[in-house]
Image (spheres, rainbow, N blue to C red):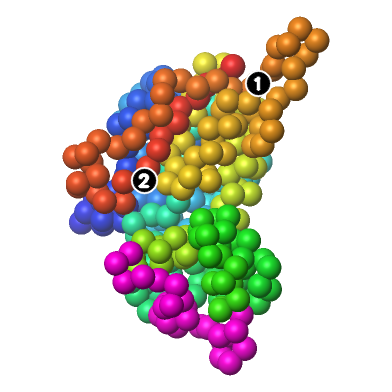
Amino acid sequence: MLQMMRMEYHNPVLLKESVNGLNIKPDGIYVDVTFGGGGHSKEILSRLNDRGKLFAFDQDEDAQRNIIDDDRFTLIPQNFRFIKRYLRFYGVKKVDGILADLGVSSHQFDEAKRGFSTRFDADLDMRMNKDGGISAFEVINNYDEEKLSAILFQYSEMRNARAIARKIVEARLEKKIKTSFELKKVLNEFVPKAVEHKVLAQIFQGIRIEVNQEIEVLKEFLLQVPEILNEGGRLSVISYHSLEDRLVKRFIRSGLFEGEPVKDFYGNITVPMKKVGNLIVPSFSEIKENNRARSAKLRIATLA
């Protein structure tokens, strides 16, 4: 029964490909920074011997119910932006591989009261950690037009971000926007029926990214990776949003998130990481089985 619940919680995307990318050493130390339903973690554990160790991070208390009963496994109930600090707490300074499956788990989308999905009428929340930070309600009702517009343009990739932000600000003057369906009603004129689901999903995605500081978290995490990876260690990152994927790609290529690295006197550049293989995307059969895999992109890297 417990096994079944875990499978329903989140169907892991690019499971074999992402774990293969870690090039597992049976007695190595590994980190799954997005534990969720434990799918990737279980796959890593299946490749470790008795001396191997796996640490997993997840700040969502729902995910903590999926804990794996295994002496080699430790679940750290924290945001992975603090990866270095909490690994040190467990006496770990270096690891052999790190896996990150970014974005929202199927469970979070399917749990109506969390407010992540456009399918359910729920309070505007969208926090991955239900105990901390600002909620979607605060973003929608308190952010000024300028800030809302920036979020919708950058994170939701909406060309008419300014007009949408203005409409939200006008609507909330009459009445606070409290639920996902109330927000959908406000957005109605900007959402063509033919692409309703796609456009609403983009808008909700942008708000969620802001609520959970997903871009800042990703940057902080990536900057720590070269410090904690062993020589020959691997990083596997699955992203679902072009902004995330761009950051991962740039960091692997240059160690920076924007601009180009400075060349030395001889025209050489020093970068912390290098890519392993090419970009990997899900197969047609995986997308058919799990529609949420359709936008997934996997990048693998090691120390330069």
Extreme right residue here? 265
Q: Is residue 121 magenta?
A: no
- The magenta region covers 169-195
Q: Amino acid at mark 2?
A: Ser
* Disc 1 versus disc 2: nearer the observer: 2
The residue closer to the viewer here, 58 or 261, is: 261
Q: Residue at x 36, y 70 (%)?
A: 192
Q: Residue at x 65, y 77 (%)?
A: 142
Q: Is residue 135 above or below residue 282?
A: below
Instruction: State whether residue 147 appears in this view.
Output: yes
**Kind of residue sitting beneath label 1:** Val
Q: Residue at x 80, y 10 (%)?
A: 265
Where does the C terminus fall, quadrant-wise? top right
Quarter of the image with the N terminus is bottom left
Residue 277: image quadrant is top left
Compared to residue 85, the image places residue 25 above or below, namely above
The answer to whether one can see residue 89 in this image is no
Q: Is residue 270 above or below residue 293?
A: above
Residue 121 spot, x, y in % from top left = 38, 79
Q: Which residue is mark 2?
A: 295
Kindly identify which residue carries mark 1: 271
Pointer 1: residues within 10 angstroms few (<14), some, or many (20+)?
some
State which quadrant residue 150 falls in: bottom right
